[in-house]
């Protein structure tokens, strides 16, 4: 965990001190602790509103810019927002440390509890406890490792299942989506089951997939269809809360061992000897893998028709 303090700007220090004095208008303590989630969220949002003061630094090195925080749908958890992802954390204590002789050394420290996996197919041990620090200035990111065993492009229903299956088999897996808010999205009819789709859902469940489990967490109501006909025509269908389904699936992906979820736009597949070796994303980064699975959905070459006007979707 490194900070490039040579790039630390004077105006950042002034704003940093202003935030500290807003939190402690009477006297600034050398150390202070918070355990109330709403208080922690309030301070996180105050810091995230100021450029160059919102860098989160992770225990293994590197970090992200904090863009905000809010209560998670998971009990006792916070959604920790960064430009490309949402990290769900369970706070234990939010600590402030101050050094009277040098305010630039002041920092906040969030200690988080381990999150227990919510599916039986993943490692039953708790995710290790993490510590995240926020300090003013610019961070120097740890050298990134972009080598994966499996890369899945597209985080719809098929992409999520493919990524989870690979990760649960022990493969280091990357799941790339163009919009993390639309993971496992149901843009049309938000239902699982029925005469046709029900067979697919059963097969996915039999193979250890996540669709049926996630359906149980986001169901609005369940109905048996075609009951006026014979048993061969009966089909169970669950109507789904589409946003809750997405939120629950994101949580499963984030806590899954061996799986990274990234918001990027894949722009190019780099092929050598008729084999895909790397994928390139819009930001210019490249991710290497001997196996690339494309789950782009049906809209990749879609077109929109309005009268005689046609354009790419």
Image: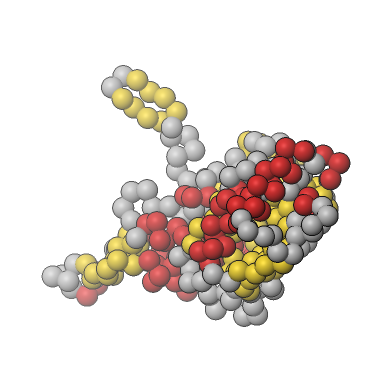
Q: Residue furthest left?
A: 228
Tell me: residue 145, above or below residue 256. Answer: above
Q: In the image, residue 76 lies at what x, y percent?
A: 51, 71
Residue 25 seen by the camera: yes
Image point (37%, 57%), residue name: 242
Image point (55%, 43%), residue name: 178
Q: In the image, residue 129 lies at what x, y percent?
A: 69, 73
Q: Residue furthest front?
A: 26
Q: Quadrant of the C terminus?
A: top left
Please state which of residues 133 and 122 is positioned toward the viewer in this rendering.
Answer: 133
> In which quarter of the view is residue 268 placed?
top right
Q: In the image, residue 201 lies at what x, y percent?
A: 41, 66
Image point (23%, 71%), residue name: 224
- Number of marks in the image? 0
Q: In the image, residue 54 lies at what x, y percent?
A: 66, 48
Question: With 83 as the anchor, is 70 left or right in this view?
Answer: left
Q: Residue furthest right?
A: 6
Please state which of residues 274 and 22 is positioned toward the viewer in this rendering.
Answer: 22
Q: Quadrant of the N terminus?
A: bottom right
Residue 152 seen by the camera: no
Colouring style: secondary structure
Please state which of residues 79 and 107 is positioned toward the viewer in this rendering.
Answer: 107
Question: With 292 as the anchor, is 234 left or right in this view?
Answer: left
Image point (40%, 70%), residue name: 217
């Amino acid at each position: 965990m490194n900070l490039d303090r040579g790039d630390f700007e004077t105006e950042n220090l002034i704003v940093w001190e202003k935030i500290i004095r807003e939190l402690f208008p009477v006297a600034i303590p050398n150390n202070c602790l918070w355990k109330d989630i709403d208080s922690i969220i309030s301070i996180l949002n105050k810091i995230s509103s100021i450029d160059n003061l919102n860098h989160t630094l992770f225990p293994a090195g590197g970090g992200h810019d904090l863009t905000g925080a809010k209560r998670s749908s998971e009990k006792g958890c916070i959604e920790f927002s960064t430009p490309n992802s949402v990290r769900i954390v369970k706070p234990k204590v939010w600590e402030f440390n101050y050094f009277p002789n040098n305010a630039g050394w002041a920092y906040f420290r969030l200690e988080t509890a381990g999150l227990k996996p919510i599916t039986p197919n993943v490692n039953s041990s708790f995710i290790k406890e993490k510590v995240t620090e926020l300090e003013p200035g610019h961070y120097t990111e740890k050298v990134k490792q972009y080598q994966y065993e499996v890369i899945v492009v597209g985080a719809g229903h098929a992409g999520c299942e493919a990524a989870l299956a690979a990760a649960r088999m022990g493969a280091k897996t990357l799941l790339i989506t163009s919009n993390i808010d639309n993971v496992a999205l149901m843009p049309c009819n938000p239902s699982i089951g029925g005469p046709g789709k029900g067979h697919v859902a059963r097969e996915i469940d039999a193979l250890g997939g996540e669709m049926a489990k996630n359906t149980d967490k986001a169901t609005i109501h369940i109905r048996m269809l075609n009951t006026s006909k014979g048993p061969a025509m009966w089909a169970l269908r669950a109507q789904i809360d589409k946003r809750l389904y997405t939120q629950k699936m994101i949580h499963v992906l984030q806590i899954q061992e061996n799986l990274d979820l990234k918001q990027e736009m894949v722009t190019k597949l780099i092929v050598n000897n008729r084999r895909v070796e790397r994928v390139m994303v819009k930001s210019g980064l490249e991710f290497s893998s001997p196996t690339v699975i494309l789950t782009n959905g049906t809209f990749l070459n879609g077109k929109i028709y309005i009268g005689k006007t046609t354009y790419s979707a």
